[in-house]
Image (tube, rainbow, N blue to C red):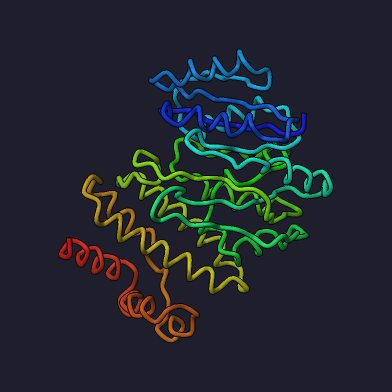
Amino acid sequence: MKLSIIVPVYKVRRHLQRCIESILQQTYTDYELILVNDGSPDNCGAICERYAQECDKVKVIHKKNGGLSSARNAGIAAARGEYITFVDGDDTVASGTYYYNMHILQANPDIDILEYPIIRYYESPRSEVISFKPEKIKGNENTFTDWVKRKGYDHCFACNKIYRADMFMFIRFPEGEVFEDILIIPQLYEASENTYYSDCGFYYYYDHPESISNTYSFKSKFFIYRNLLQLHEKVSKKSELKEQAYDILFHCTDNLIDLFRCRDGEKNKYKEAAAMIKGKNISLPELYKLNMPIKRKIKLTTLALFGANIHCRIYALLHKKLN
């Protein structure tokens, strides 16, 4: 068994059959498909069982609801393949994706992580193609640094990658989190010896109103904000990644602005969020040296002059007035 494909399943009844069919129709055949029914209250469990009865490649795990990370971890524990990949239950994979990419991995057995193209917000007005020139990155010191320089945190998905299974020997998805990919993907790149960027295949990431990425609650925004801050701490320790550290900081301030706009958070949580970014700043001369559009620099001028807290509160207030 070469490849274990893990699909967490929760409230995706309308999309699940399309997802499973896109996997079963792959031209690569040396795989197992692990469907993890994470206590879904609809008939997803029955759909999974039907496929398991019809195809011996399909294995079903039924578990109490624990969230996306918990479901992925259950799949990892059951996986028997030399490689592991993830597909969300409301997404699909282009035909031939695993065939071409598994051939690359078989020809390069030292690769720990292979990333392949993804279409973000597929079939949506904001659809965006993220693709790569074929390139192998060698050496443990280079893989994480290269990932940051490519701004991998801008497309920090667990799903458009194939991992050597032993990468998960000591690493698991953090349970109870939202936007947990921002925590685990940097860990995996730090632990990898060699990575590969492939131009083969496509992962179709659909834009559904009910998806996690479209949930604008205080809780979800707080998780992504905190996780980005943790990545900023890690990146800012590397002098060669100074510009990227600033870029991540600016992402953090954008998320803090969104947090201040949320109305469903507890008062002490807003204070906690503001305190987390205290002391993280940029000088005005340093800001204007950065390679970015002048419009963005003008917006961030208040960050350089007054600090992150005041900058974020100003823009949150402006958004409120405009809306």
| Foreground pick, 291 / 27 | 27
User: x, y (%) of residue 299?
Assistant: 33, 75
Q: Residue at x 57, y 43 (%)?
A: 159
| Foreground pick, 184 / 82 | 82
Which quarter of the image is occupied by the N terminus?
A: top right
- Vertical position of residue 195 compared to residue 59: above or below: below
User: x, y (%) of residue 75?
Assistant: 60, 28
Left or right, 299 with respect to 156, comes to: left
Residue furthest top as drawn: 53
User: x, y (%) of residue 237?
Assistant: 58, 67
- Vertical position of residue 316 compared to residue 170: above or below: below
User: x, y (%) of residue 195?
Assistant: 72, 54
How many numbered tags mark residues here?
Answer: 0
Left or right, 305 with respect to 67, comes to: left
- Vertical position of residue 102 compared to residue 138: above or below: above
Name the quadrant containing residue 26: top right
Q: Residue at x 78, y 48 (%)?
A: 104
Q: Residue at x 65, y 18 (%)?
A: 55
Which quarter of the image is occupied by the C terminus?
A: bottom left
Name the quadrant containing residue 275: bottom left
Name the quadrant containing residue 136: bottom right
